[in-house]
Image (tube, coloured by chain):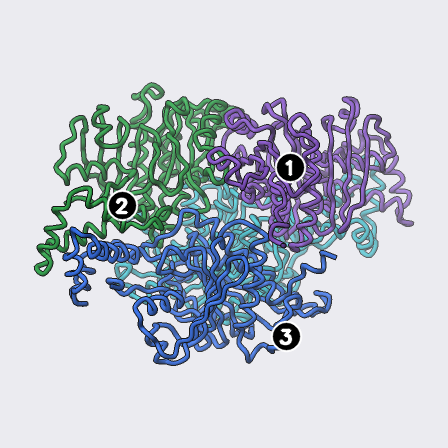
Chain colours: A cyan, B purple, C blue, D green
Amino acid sequence: MGDVYEIRTDLALETQEKMQEEHIDVRGVRFLEEKKPYGMTVSTVVIETENAAHSMGKPKGRYITLEAENLSEDDEDYHREISMELAKIIRGILPEKMVKKENLEDLTEGIEVAVLVVGLGNRGVTPDALGPRVVDNMFITRHVLQEFGKYAFGNVKTGSISGIVPGVMAQTGMETVEIIRGVVKESKPDFAIVIDALAARNTRRLGRTIQLSDTGINPGSGVGNHRNAINEKSIGVPVISVGVPTVVDAATIVADGMSALIRAMGESATLKNLGDNLDELGDSEKQELAREVLSPQLHGMFVTPKNIDESVKQLSFTISEALNIAFLGNKEDDWNI
Amino acid sequence: MGDVYEIRTDLALETQEKMQEEHIDVRGVRFLEEKKPYGMTVSTVVIETENAAHSMGKPKGRYITLEAENLSEDDEDYHREISMELAKIIRGILPEKMVKKENLEDLTEGIEVAVLVVGLGNRGVTPDALGPRVVDNMFITRHVLQEFGKYAFGNVKTGSISGIVPGVMAQTGMETVEIIRGVVKESKPDFAIVIDALAARNTRRLGRTIQLSDTGINPGSGVGNHRNAINEKSIGVPVISVGVPTVVDAATIVADGMSALIRAMGESATLKNLGDNLDELGDSEKQELAREVLSPQLHGMFVTPKNIDESVKQLSFTISEALNIAFLGNKEDDWNI
Amino acid sequence: MGDVYEIRTDLALETQEKMQEEHIDVRGVRFLEEKKPYGMTVSTVVIETENAAHSMGKPKGRYITLEAENLSEDDEDYHREISMELAKIIRGILPEKMVKKENLEDLTEGIEVAVLVVGLGNRGVTPDALGPRVVDNMFITRHVLQEFGKYAFGNVKTGSISGIVPGVMAQTGMETVEIIRGVVKESKPDFAIVIDALAARNTRRLGRTIQLSDTGINPGSGVGNHRNAINEKSIGVPVISVGVPTVVDAATIVADGMSALIRAMGESATLKNLGDNLDELGDSEKQELAREVLSPQLHGMFVTPKNIDESVKQLSFTISEALNIAFLGNKEDDWNI
Amino acid sequence: MGDVYEIRTDLALETQEKMQEEHIDVRGVRFLEEKKPYGMTVSTVVIETENAAHSMGKPKGRYITLEAENLSEDDEDYHREISMELAKIIRGILPEKMVKKENLEDLTEGIEVAVLVVGLGNRGVTPDALGPRVVDNMFITRHVLQEFGKYAFGNVKTGSISGIVPGVMAQTGMETVEIIRGVVKESKPDFAIVIDALAARNTRRLGRTIQLSDTGINPGSGVGNHRNAINEKSIGVPVISVGVPTVVDAATIVADGMSALIRAMGESATLKNLGDNLDELGDSEKQELAREVLSPQLHGMFVTPKNIDESVKQLSFTISEALNIAFLGNKEDDWNI
């Protein structure tokens, strides 16, 4: 038996896994998993058709997930490796119309595009602060290039990076997409990279997963409610999203507990026929159970780990470093002579 | 049926309620509830004997709980009323050997005692930041009194207030009680007031409840693990604790969901006999269920509301204002002439 | 003798004072000073002609300055009085085409206009954090009114308040005016109120002065360089500015020291004729002295008080409270019944 | 001519330079300057006798200064080099009675000592936040070693690191030295390393200099007034101080301006004899000038660069990394295989 209730996740990988578990074969979805050094796994889900998008509950496009066990631990050299891998993934997912493919191989060189980095979320709520903190750590270049040109950076190839932390609706009174659209119209970047904290389906993912997508940000179940769709259609330029699951919806873990309870009843000798009976319940009866059981008090509550501050700090460094490398190039070699 | 699993709460009021629900009469516990203006309720639990302390799982002493529906909302004048009520409660729970009772009635005057205000918790994790933020907003006077005497405050009665934010063990490498004991030995306050974020049993309490106690802080299930017992025995001076529940343990809400499921089965026509059967399960079978169902992944996870930042901000103002009034007196009238 | 070097100030009042000191009568400037309770002084400088604007080095318009000795001290009731006075001044300076005059008298009622509050400055540099902190403390209503209408606020008159903290150019790579213009175009407020930390001419003003103006923000000498002109012409809606001097340019205090030295020489018996001789120096000779003496190392340096954190905290509360009262009305009486 | 007024600096190197400029030969002071790669300069001032200490206005002991042009710029690999150099300096200045010299050469290994890292200063005032931020970035190990022993770190040599951010007197009401003494007595480290923001004599030093000393912290002219002497005598264990100049006293730059003016007068053809005359002023006349000219308003004011936030951020990373390397060893090679 699957989940008692339909539960949202911001991770395409989790939707894919659920489909596999339930032996549902979705046509129009391609899936690829690669093992990388340092215990990293890179998974790619490509949703190729509108039908597949409907089944998966996510827009057509590419979803790339980098997983690593120690992503939120504090080890500078390990994170340099993750950042390098992530920088490659970022370059690979950039909109083709903006970026010439031949320029992307060499990470020691920057690429000459104009990118607006948007840090979504609420700086004051720890698991939602990832986006603002990534922007804090970006190496901002747009104003320098506009005033002094490439000369200011030794004439090497340098991306034009701008950044904005729009805040959440409770702080601004505006839809976040309104603010971004306004800033994009004025500053005219080639595309936007939007950083956000995500909601996962499974607590095991928290702080161990980074998802990149070329579909932008679509209304979901993150920490805050700061998100009408942010995509090429709504803001006028292509949108790459970079997200890290930092919370699980409170209702999700309760529903999981109940599913596990029902499953356990099916497996327990004493309770076997109770569990079997529950498994035979129709959908409407399950919904009735859900309504009675899932207290409205869980609405607006999320689950997050006690060490979320360290996790967000570490992940924001890793992501900002990856973005800096992807657009400005990796200067390490200059200094190691 | 009660809870499937034993679940901890930092609130004596919740333990009291559970006892009442289960019709357990604990001898040696007194309970009093008073309705106050502005929708406030003040409940007092007094644990009078060691036996009662054992049954309640909390040390002997007084536990006073102030509840109000809008405690975490942003309304300055409403909060002034809450702060005044809270200031009275604080004065009433101060250690008698330190404070002469006759001086406490008049809130427009301060009281001449030396108090160390300790803000427990991790400033970087929003629901754990309550303690540090209260200390941020205290009106610190000890150094001024030491240098200039009462003269600096117009010769009116003025408490000597000092404050410390010790940090959590992951930040300091030390037990919090070590730091406080060291600071108490050097600065010699009459007593300490320790502010902490608590774990409640029920999400409904979050942001709506303030608990005061004359028993200090005892190892519990708060956000962080920053707490060996902090009480007169461990630090050398009496300890008043002021706590606000800001989180619920993740395992708690899952166990609640399962209890509700079992209860719902008992009430549903279709499932009646399943539920009844489960209700008849023995304790060991329930424990078995628990072990199978409550994933170890929930360990180290907590549940908190999405607007926790506003809630902590508002409550820290209310508590610091109450402490300032309790020790320095309420100066309002001076200005309203 | 006046200042040796021309020195900028963001305060029209200081320019006015300098003109008076030097007995320069600028036609087209009106000046009014009123004493208020609680030691407040309210000064109004109105620059009425383009000629006067040229002489004063500031655009045509109204500049209202509220001064009070203890503006940055921590006294809640005193600040309530300041906030009420400031709320009246804010209402009086709102653009007439947007706001009907007859509605402004009664501070217990809000006014039905749509205002965007912009917090300029860098949250990470204490004296420049005033603007961001004011927005943090605003009571944001626009999204609630848009979703639920006046009903959400008990059908009383309520301003539609939105807020934005655009960041500074080093953080965003964009001119602040670009960001604000984009946000204004999308969210269409009636006007903007822009909060900023200012540079004063005199350290005595720091933390004791609030300047309001209907001319917007014009390139000046504040902490950061976050300001192309922000006014009706550049963003498309009228701009009211609220500024507090928190820094003095480092070069300013050095020039002051030198002026004082030269003046002292003129007054000292021993040095009298040296001072007199210096007083007779021509302007070009003074400029030469300036170039030699004012080290380029002072460029990019500012002077600020050691307790600037308390000062900015207190002033940001006072200003946000005044704005909340001006647009939402003062609810105090509701609770005191 | 030297300075008109006696001006304090926290940097022994600046005192040394002033002595050299004025051709004062202080017996009992040794001075050594070394050029290092990456444009670093390491200077050592050793004050060997009480007489020399009196002349220099600083206690007997070693003062080592690391200077580099780009210390506050954002370049990860450059800073790794600085951190490695700094780690060597830290190891070289540790108290000999605590640390066996033979263990110090190999930076890939940690050293088995117990160190308390103290972050002095006020987190809320940007140039004073250096100490707190260094502690934020320390890799704290004491609690892990106490609970699990070396096993937790793969049995390699690992320092026991604890940390504390005591706050400043306005926040705590206590002398900082009281708090540190209390914490030292309870937690019993072998020695303390105290991080502080310093006041320089010259704006050119700001953000480009790190001073280490084995004499602790002695009352000076830093940003805040958070410092009674913190040294072996006052807290009971040896104290190593690490300081970075982030401010210059406001009175200092004014006095500099006046000195420069007087010097300029001596050099200018027109003013030559004025300047010469001033140069001939006696000390009492200079003091009189000072009293008239140096306004008391400059008291409590400091000068700091506009980009101080970036500077403090970068330097806190460099210093915390150096401390982590010095006590825990540099793990880089593990990952680069």
Q: Which residue is mark 2?
A: D205
| C-alpha gap between disc 1 and disc 3 | 50 Å
Q: Can you tell which of label 2 and label 3 is closer to the viewer?
A: 3
Q: Secondary structure at mark 3?
A: helix
Q: Nearer the viewer, residue D296 or A293?
A: D296
| C-alpha gap between disc 1 and disc 2 | 46 Å
Q: Secondary structure at mark 1?
A: loop
Amino acid type at image mark 3: Asn
Above or below residue D30? Residue C6 is: below
Task: Give the residue displayed 64% in from the left and 61% down from the top.
Answer: A57
Measured as percent of width and height from the top left, residue B223 is found at: 62, 39
Determine whether, in the image, residue A223 is placed left or right of residue C228: right
| Disc assigned to residue C103 | 3
Chain ID for label 1? B
Q: Can you see residue A168?
A: no
| C-alpha gap between disc 2 and disc 3 | 57 Å
Amino acid type at image mark 1: Gly
- Examine the image and state in which quarter residue D239 appears: top left
Task: Give the residue displayed 38% in from the left and 36% down from the top.
Answer: D195
Q: Which residue is mark 1?
A: B222
Q: In the rendered structure, are the residues bearing label 1 and label 3 in contact, judged by CB atoms less than 8 Å apart?
A: no
Q: Residues within 10 Å of mark 1 (few under 14, many from 20)?
A: many
Placement of the N terminus of chain D among the 4 image quadrants: top left
Q: Can you tell which of label 1 and label 3 is closer to the viewer?
A: 3
- Examine the image and state in which quarter residue D229 appears: top left
Amino acid type at image mark 2: Arg
Determine whether, in the image, residue A289 is placed left or right of residue A130: right
Measured as percent of width and height from the top left, residue C91 is found at: 56, 70
